């Protein structure tokens, strides 16, 4: 028995799901698609795909496989020097008509061209029909490029489909649900079958249905070994429908990475920063006194804001300081930066005196890289601080906290009206109105009509489509209270009994638990509010964290022991929603709990068998949490905190995209951010 158990023990690295396989899969799919076109080729790229492709490959690899030049796909004539032209885009009707127009123009030239259209992530009958109507279907070869889950960090993977939320809940187009199912099927082929699928929400239910139906169909010809039986490393898949928790993304994020996304903007893990913050390394070298460099302040925020911007990737894989800062509540970032500065200063002084051998010099120079990271994040923090000290920002935070606590709702509506009168940004006003409606079951009809009228008069009548979408039955983010009989029943069914849910799941902390380096609950990420979505994950994977101030369930103070392992308890087996059936029933949408079988009838072990196996083998399992409709950086931070509280369980966050409140409002209103009109670069 002991020999068998020891043979199954894994090192920490083996316990991790190796996400590099996903990167290689995407890269190989792109290379194979390009290699299907012989000779030099011009790549015409859908701007929305530039960021995702940049996470998978580099321009040098594309050039190695015959790409001569790249251009953004946009209306107007296309000037090319190669005979082969490859279009790479999502199945967007406007883009397809642009392609058809360019093909018509180029076929009239004396030079003969070969056209290929690669659709992401799969071909579409609608696209073929449009090309046929435009009269160019016979001139262009249509294929697919299966761009699926892309690793953003070692615990985050994403479809990077920024339009998924809008497509599902505004346009009524569930293509993103199908694409998510296909991506999760591919994931299971690589890493093994999910023993159990749990979830909440109607769209999550449809995704689960697709998963259980499509998986056997996708593998009837050649059954992968990974699908024969439940995975040894994965214990479950938790699918969270974004509509179940719209409160969380509408709130202002308060973690370091979340605030960068809110106030500066992160796209596909890249952020645009003043070039001086990124070029400081050229002015600091081994000859510079480390103590002086560590204390050098960056330029004032006003000066930095006017500088030319340069793209920088925020990733923990190459920036250890960012790994420490990204999930902290922003109120703790300054202290952590000061402590890091003192540590680097002491290490640099000591290293310079001790560096005599080549190896010691290399270590010393490596510490200077940490110095550059310190400068960078100090500069970013100094850019953020003035933005967080504005009256509108702090007033909006106060209104949010009061709404979450159900404190004098009518006074909060008045405060929102005051923000409008002061010319606050529209997206702040809209987010607050949505929060007021969600936490109070709607807004009094007469008051709501007055608010809509004020918005149209203050911000323009072109905002009417946005207001109509927010009030639509599919979204129901701003609705009257009580719901008029003329409204569809789905609107009333989508209401959240906020007061009872808040108390049952401890969503609002009595004190701001953990605005320091040792948080005791996930509510630290929003300075007192625990994200509903992450609480739902805890209902499945860490029940003690829902019932007490400590994830261990016994009230111990996390972070107070010198031995962190003493504060971790063994993760309990996944036993579904047991104990939280009533509160789950009060939330909108279906509740999912499905146990999967292997493709040849291998039954999934029951909860008791799973528990016995976990205890005997003392292994680490991975729970995949999939956000259908997107998740925020703050939710990711909260899930990482949950994962650190117990032994034997890790969380892998999967999502259709990374979202924010501003991004949601912009997508609903039809706004978008595109790259400049010129030759494309990744």
Image (tube, rainbow, N blue to C red):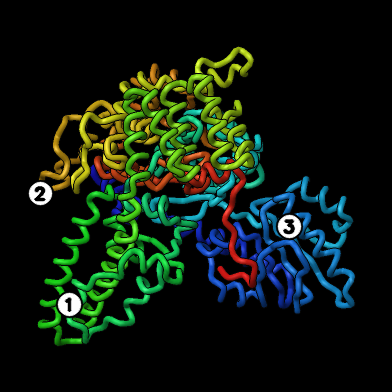
Quadrant in the picture for the C terminus: bottom right
Q: CA distance from mark 1 to mark 2?
A: 33 Å
Q: Which corner quadrant holds the N terminus?
A: top left
- Tell me if 624 is positioned left or right of 48 in this view: left
* Residue located beneath label 2 in the image: 562
> Depth check: 429 or 371 in front?
429
Q: Residue 589: x percent and y percent?
A: 51, 24
Q: Residues within 10 Å of mark 1 (few under 14, many from 20)?
A: few
Residue in the image at 30% along x and 58% along y: 323
Q: Residues within 10 Å of mark 3 (few under 14, many from 20)?
A: some
Q: Is residue 113 left or right of residue 289?
A: right
Which residue appears farthest toward the top when viewing the image?
Answer: 485
Q: Which mark is first along the chain, 3 or 1?
A: 3
For the point 40% across and 39% down, which residue is it? 251
Report x, y in % for residue 143.
73, 57
Camera-nearest residue between 593 and 133 = 133
In the picture, measured across the screen, residue 285 lies left or right of residue 621, that is left
**Residue 270 locus on image (x, y percent):** 45, 61
C-alpha distance separating marks 1 and 3: 58 Å
Question: In which quadrant of the rendered view does residue 305 lie?
Answer: bottom left
Q: Earlier in the sequence, mark 1 or mark 2?
A: 1
Please tell me in which quadrant of the rendered image residue 295 appears.
bottom left
Circle 2 crowding by C-alpha within 10 Å: few under 14, some 14–19, many from 20:
few
Which residue bears the numbered disc 1? 292
**Are the residues flagged by discs 1 and 3 in contact, CB closer than 8 Å?**
no
Q: Which mark is residue 143?
A: 3
């Amino acid at each position: 028995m002991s020999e068998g158990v020891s043979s199954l023990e894994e090192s920490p690295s083996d316990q991790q799901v190796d996400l590099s396989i996903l990167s290689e899969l995407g890269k190989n799919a792109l290379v194979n698609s390009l290699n299907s076109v012989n000779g030099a080729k011009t790549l015409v790229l859908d701007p929305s795909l530039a960021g995702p492709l940049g996470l998978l490959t580099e321009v040098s690899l594309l050039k190695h496989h015959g790409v001569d030049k790249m251009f953004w796909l946009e209306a107007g004539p296309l000037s090319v020097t190669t005979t082969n032209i490859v279009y790479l885009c999502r199945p967007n009707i406007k883009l397809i008509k642009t392609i058809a127009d360019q093909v018509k123009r180029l076929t009239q030239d004396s030079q003969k061209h070969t056209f290929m259209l690669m659709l992401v992530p799969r071909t579409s009958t609608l696209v073929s029909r449009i090309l046929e109507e435009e009269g160019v279907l016979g001139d262009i070869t249509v294929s697919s490029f299966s761009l699926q889950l892309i690793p953003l960090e070692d615990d985050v993977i994403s479809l990077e489909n920024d339009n998924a939320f809008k497509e599902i809940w505004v346009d009524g187009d569930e293509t993103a649900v199908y694409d998510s199912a296909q991506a999760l099927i591919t994931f299971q082929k690589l890493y093994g079958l999910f023993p159990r699928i749990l979830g909440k929400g109607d769209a999550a239910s449809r995704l689960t249905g697709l998963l259980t139906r499509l998986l056997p169909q996708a593998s009837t010809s050649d059954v992968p070994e990974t699908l024969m039986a439940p995975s040894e490393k994965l214990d479950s898949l938790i699918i969270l429908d974004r509509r179940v928790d719209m409160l969380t993304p509408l709130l202002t994020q308060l973690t370091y990475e979340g605030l960068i996304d809110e106030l500066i903007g992160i796209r596909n893990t890249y952020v645009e920063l003043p070039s001086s913050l990124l070029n400081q390394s050229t002015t600091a070298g081994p000859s510079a006194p480390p103590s002086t460099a560590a204390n050098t302040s960056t330029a004032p925020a006003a000066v930095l804001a006017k500088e030319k911007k340069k793209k920088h990737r925020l990733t923990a894989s190459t920036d250890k300081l960012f790994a420490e800062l990204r999930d902290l509540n922003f109120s703790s970032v300054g202290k952590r930066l000061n402590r890091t500065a003192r540590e680097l200063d002491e290490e640099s002084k000591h290293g310079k005196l001790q560096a005599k051998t080549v190896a010691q010099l290399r270590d010393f120079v490596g510490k200077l890289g940490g110095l550059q990271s310190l400068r960078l994040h100090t500069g970013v923090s100094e850019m953020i601080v003035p933005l967080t000290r504005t009256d509108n920002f702090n007033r909006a935070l106060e209104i949010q906290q009061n709404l979450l606590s159900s404190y004098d709702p009518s006074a909060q509506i008045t405060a929102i009206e005051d923000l409008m009168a002061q010319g606050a940004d529209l997206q702040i006003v809209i987010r607050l109105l949505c929060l007021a409606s969600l936490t109070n079951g709607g807004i009094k009809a007469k008051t709501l009509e007055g608010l809509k009228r004020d918005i149209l008069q203050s911000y323009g009548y072109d905002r009417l489509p946005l207001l109509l979408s927010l009030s639509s039955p599919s979204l129901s983010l701003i609705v009257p209270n009580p719901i008029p009989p003329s409204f569809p029943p789905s609107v009333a069914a989508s209401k959240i009994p906020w007061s009872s849910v808040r108390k049952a799941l401890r969503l609002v902390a009595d004190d701001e638990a953990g605005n320091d380096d040792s948080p005791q609950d996930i509510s630290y990420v929003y300075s007192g509010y625990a994200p509903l979505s992450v609480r739902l994950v805890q209902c499945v994977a860490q029940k003690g964290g829902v019932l007490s101030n400590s994830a261990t369930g016994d009230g111990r103070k996390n972070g107070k022991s010198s031995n962190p392992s003493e504060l971790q308890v063994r993760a309990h087996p996944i036993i579904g929603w047991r104990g939280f059936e009533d509160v789950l029933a009060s939330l909108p949408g279906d509740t999912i709990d499905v146990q999967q079988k292997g493709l040849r009838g291998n039954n999934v072990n029951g909860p008791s068998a799973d528990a016995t196996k976990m205890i005997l083998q003392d292994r680490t399992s991975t729970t995949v949490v999939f956000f259908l409709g997107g998740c925020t950086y703050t939710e990711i931070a909260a899930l990482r905190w949950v994962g650190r509280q117990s032994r034997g369980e890790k969380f892998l966050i999967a999502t259709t995209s990374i979202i924010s409140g501003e991004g949601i409002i912009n997508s609903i209103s039809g706004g978008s951010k595109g790259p400049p009109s010129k030759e494309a670069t990744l």
